[in-house]
Each structure stands twice: as C-alpha cells, then as structure tokens.
Amino acid sequence: MKKKPMEPSKKILLPVDGSERCLETVKYVARYAPFHSMKAVLFNVFSDVPECYWDLEREPKSVKAALHVRAWVSQKKKEMEEYMEKARQILLRGSFEADAVSVQIHSRKKGVARDILKEAQRRYTAVVLRRRGATGLRNITMGSVATKLMERLTCCPLIIVGRKPMSRRVLIGVDGSEGAIHAVDFVAKTLDGLDFSAHLVNVIRETWTEVAGEEGEPAAPVHPLKAEEEIVPVLEDAKSRLLEAGFTSDRVTWRVVTGVKSRAAAIAEEAEKEDCETIVVGRRGLSGVKEFFIGRVSNKVVQLARKNTVWVVT
C-alpha cells in the first residue's frame, strides 16, 4: 500500500495516561495507514502535587514529609517520561517519521478532560483515545475522561478505539443531516487512495421517522416508505463524494435498513454483519438540538458497539 505524502496541517492528538490500555491505542495508530501521513502528539496530563504541599517545607516539623513528597513526584515524572518514550518508539516502528512524533507532559491545570479539550482546540485533525484508561473497570462502558470528551469535544472528530481486529472496511451512518455529510467528507479526506471500502447505511424505524428540511428548516415526520424514497438521493450523493475522493466504485456500497425499533442497534448490527471494524457517525443527527453536544443515536452507537472503533465527526 502506497503511503500518502505528509500534510503538515494534519495532526492527531493521543491522550495517554501511563496505562497498558493506552499503549494499545498507540499501537492502533502505529498500524493504521491513514495516520502515517499525519503528525502525532502524545499528550499526558500529569497530576502534580498541589502547591500547598510545598508549604510543608517551611514548617520545621514537616520538612522530612515534604522531601518524601518531592521525591515521589520526581519518580512519577521519570516513569512518565520513560512511558512516553516507549509510546514514541511504537509510533516510529509503525512508519511514523521521527520529526512527525512529539511528546508533551502537561502539568494538570483545570482537570484531565478539560486540559485535553483545551489542547484539542489547537487545530488537530482528530483526537484518538481508548474507551477506558488506567482504571479499566469491566462493567463501565466508557471511562470518565472518554465520556467527557465525547460530550464536549466539538472542534474536531473524536476517534474511540475498540478491540476488534483492524480492517479496511468502514460503515458510515447517513441520515441526511449536515453532520452525516461531514462524516462522509472526513472519511473521504482521511482514507482516500488507501484501498479502503465504505458501506453507507441509513436506518428507518418501523414508525414515522424524520427527514431534514431545506435550508436549516427543522426535521419533519415522514412515513417510512416516503423516507426511504427520499434518502436514496442522499446516499447516492454520499457515494459520489467518496468516488471523487479516490474510492473505487466497487468499494462503495449503500443500504437502507427499514422496520427496526432502534437506529443505533441497527447500525451496530449492520457493522457486525458487514465486517466493518470502524463505524463513522456525525456528532448530531437530524434534530441538531444545540443544547446537546452529541446526538442521541450517535451516543447510543458508541455505547452499543463496544468492540468497534467509532469515529464521531463534528
């Protein structure tokens, strides 16, 4: 597979916390060809000791305790530096150029998630992370940091890495919304020319559904049969966008799934059926309610497709 030339403006942010789980995410990025033409920033929010602890050094009875604290912080910082170098080497072995990988150990300011969000605003192509970090509690679908980023990250796409074996087939949820078109365009720009295949899917529930109005008009209820008829041109347009970007016609398919109770569950099931390791959805769907940072269907897809890698595109 030919490697695309590097585009300096493209870079991905990889938040890491020192855990083995995060190293698996770094390995995913190292193996995933579309990222090899980008720059990668390994970003750790380092939780230092509050300033009040250093005030202990001014108290004669607490000097020894303060020295222990300082030594502990120094050791943790050293361990994190070693971890970041290990992560960097993984990327270098995975076809990244040495000058395309940078490391940032950032002293925590407002909180882990909020500090990552602030860094993400510096013109990143995407933020890539795992569902759970160091805690890795089995009964928790998403870790607290991943959940906060999914809810609040609106400046660039969020890529939540799953556990399924990597493949070159992606499923894109298309519902006629602006967010879905952004998702198609992001896939087109990211995967063009790399022999990937895309499966476009629209899901119509068994009851009346919503179809977006024109020029910003709110969505309106439409009978399922009418909705299916109206979505076909949207899917054809999405296919055309992929073909224009370099996808071949035999690698782009589309399907309308009808008569289901849950759009999110249908998308997850279709991804399993079509052997799509990656699912791509827009951040907000047809309703586009501004009070919600992420749409109901997109949120449920992330929760249900726990083993898949999910791209949530703004």
Image (cartoon, helix red, strand yellow):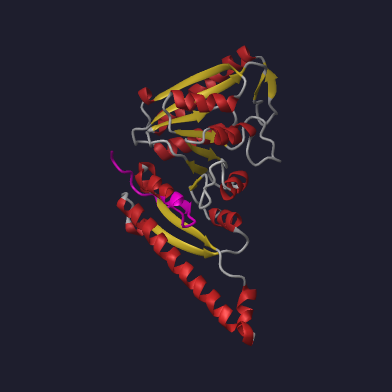
Viewer-closest of 5 and 167? 167
Identified at 50% across, 42% down, the residue is 160
Q: Residue 6 in magenta?
A: yes
Magenta part of the chain:
1-23
Residue 289: x and y in percent read: 69, 36
Identified at 65% across, 75% down, the residue is 52
Residue 290: x and y in percent read: 69, 39
Q: Is residue 192 left or right of residue 288?
A: left
Up the image or down, 222 lies above or below 310; here it is above
Q: Is residue 118 left or right of residue 276?
A: right
Q: Is residue 11 visible?
A: no
Residue 84: x and y in percent read: 41, 60
Chief SS of the magenta region: loop
Q: Is residue 251 left or right of residue 285?
A: left
Viewer-closest of 305 and 267? 305
Q: Residue 152 in magenta?
A: no
Identified at 59% across, 45% down, the residue is 147
Up the image or down, 196 lies above or below 142; here it is above
Q: Is residue 267 visible?
A: yes
Identified at 40% across, 53% down, the residue is 39
